[in-house]
């Protein structure tokens, strides 16, 4: 029963991610940086950034790659944390069963 519940939850999450992509036609999924830059230029057209990046990626593909690597590393850290705490919880339960 618990195994089916987990698969139902995973399926629900995947559907929540995929269905909007299929239902929204002709959409432009831009990044938040571009949206922020556009909003700032509308609110304060004379605004000049006070900070410049130390290194510019050579192209948009490189920028996407760096974003994907960053997301993968973040997902790895979150997955490791979840696995760590789950393993610790199972060890604690096993210790309690062995002690009883």
Image: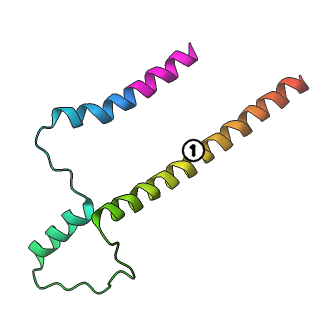
Side (left or right) of 47 relative to 1: left
| Residue occupying image coordinates x 32% and y 32% | 16
Q: Is residue 67 magenta?
A: no
| Residue occupying image coordinates x 35% and y 80% | 53
| Residue occupying image coordinates x 26% and y 65% | 33
> What's the image's color scheme?
rainbow
Give the residue number, with chain letter if any, for mark 1: 79
The rendered magenta stretch, by its main secondary structure, is classed as: helix
User: Which of the 4 image quarters holds residue 54?
Assistant: bottom left
Q: Is residue 93 above or below residue 42?
A: above
**Residue 55: horizontal and vertical position, in percent?**
38, 79
| Residue occupying image coordinates x 55% and y 49% | 76
Q: The C terminus is located in which quarter?
A: top right
Q: Is residue 58 above or below residue 47?
A: above
User: Which of the 4 image quarters holds residue 46?
Assistant: bottom left
Q: Is residue 3 magenta?
A: yes
What stretch of residues is rendered in magenta? 1-11
SS under mark 1: helix
Q: The N terminus is located in which quarter?
A: top right
**Residue 15: horizontal and vertical position, in percent?**
33, 28
**Residue 78: horizontal and vertical position, in percent?**
55, 48
Q: Which residue ends up furthest to the right in the rendered image?
A: 99
Q: Is residue 63 above or below residue 23?
A: below
């Amino acid at each position: 029963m618990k195994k089916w519940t987990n698969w139902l939850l995973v399926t629900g999450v995947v559907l929540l991610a995929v269905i909007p992509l299929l239902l929204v036609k002709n959409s432009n999924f831009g990044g938040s940086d571009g949206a922020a830059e556009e909003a700032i230029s509308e609110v304060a057209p004379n605004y000049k950034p006070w900070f410049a990046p130390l290194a510019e990626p050579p192209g948009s593909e490189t920028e996407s790659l760096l974003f994907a690597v960053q997301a993968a590393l973040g997902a790895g850290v979150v997955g490791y944390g979840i696995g760590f705490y789950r393993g610790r919880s199972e060890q604690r339960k096993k210790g309690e069963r062995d002690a009883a």
